[in-house]
Amino acid sequence: MKKSVFTLIIILFAKSIFAQSIEKFPVSENWLEEIESLAPSSARVKATVKKIMVFSQHTGFYHWTIPHNDEMLKILAKKSGAFEITIARDIDSFDKKNLKKYDAVILNNSNPSGPKRDLFSDLLEQNSSLDTNTITKLAAQYENNLMEYVAKGGGLMIMHGAITVQNNSIKFSEMVGGSFDYHPKQQEMHLKEVNPEHPLVQAFNGEGFTHIDEPYFFKNAYFDYNFKPLLYIEADKLEGVKNEVENNIIYVSWIKRHGKGRVFYSSPSHNPQSMNAELLQFFLDGMQYVVGDLHCDDSPMGS
């Protein structure tokens, strides 16, 4: 079957799913078997097994793909033999001693509530009886713990909505490459490679990726372009764009260095039914990048 036909089938299937309630798309055995069949059988780079903590807790908007992502990441890890995955949900996971156990952290749609947009503060408020001043200090400490962890060589992969984890923190925005601004409605879009020759996008074979998703727009450090962009969408192809977009380009995935560590952000994908073999390979390659196994050009745009 030609790829274009296969892509059309996926889009039509996705549209039919969106018309149903999310309860009708659970983490089923059929879905798990499909992901297992699509997942790469090996990693691009052979290396020692790396340990990754996947943080899958939220306090704000619940992305219903969180449990799907947990299972997808476990399948990628097991089938490739490249990683050991630990799913975490407690704020104590960001203690310095605990972070040292892992080669990388994945933030899985860890959305905080608004308008404060501070996941660490939210979790402390929900799970402790501490006073406001103590919560403020501890939340700042957890944020610093994660930033220091990356600066000293840890990896950080951010999936879709998790870019909002500390959305009002400028220093966190500088580390991850930007902050969330807004998104129009879910719609069909075609993502394109910035440079089809870059190792991190070779999964798409120069043809990009068409799916239904939320087109994310960004603010704060995003406009410093202190990252190496991987994928983009064209603003004039979207509905609901609020403001004029420079060069008509919205970067929706990138990599960057932070100190000795590496960061990989992917806005795709909000929806588990969008996952195909190319996207799974993209995620696996991104995981290998953040742990330091897959070496590639990650110089920022302005360098």
Image (cartoon, rainbow, N blue to C red):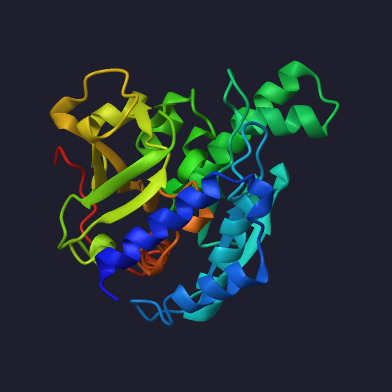
**Above or below for 11 versus 94:** below
**Does residue 203 appear in the picture of this structure?**
no
Indicate left or right for 255 with 303 as reference. right
| Quadrant where the image shows the C terminus | top left
- In the rendered image, residue 81, in percent from the top left (x then y), is placed at 50, 80
Number of disc labels: 0
Along the line of sight, the residue nearer the viewer: 119 or 51: 119
Question: Is any atom of residue 232 visible in this view?
Answer: yes
Q: Residue at x 40, y 46 (%)?
A: 212
Identify the residue shown where x is 64% and y is 46%. 22
Q: Is residue 281 above or below residue 169?
A: below
* Closer to us: 149 or 276: 276
Quadrant housing the N terminus: bottom left
Which of 169 and 254 lies nearest the eye of the viewer? Answer: 254
Residue at the spot x=52%, y=40% of the render? 162
Image-based side of 138 in relation to 32, left or right: right
User: Horizontally, is 229 left or right of 116 in the view?
Assistant: left
Position in image of residue 63 (x %, y %): 59, 42
Q: Where residue 260 sits: x, y (%)?
A: 36, 52
Q: Is residue 113 above or below residue 176?
A: above
**Residue drawn where x is 62% and y is 37% of the image:** 142
Image coordinates for residue 35, horizontal then vertical, percent: 52, 70
Residue extending farthest to the right is: 129
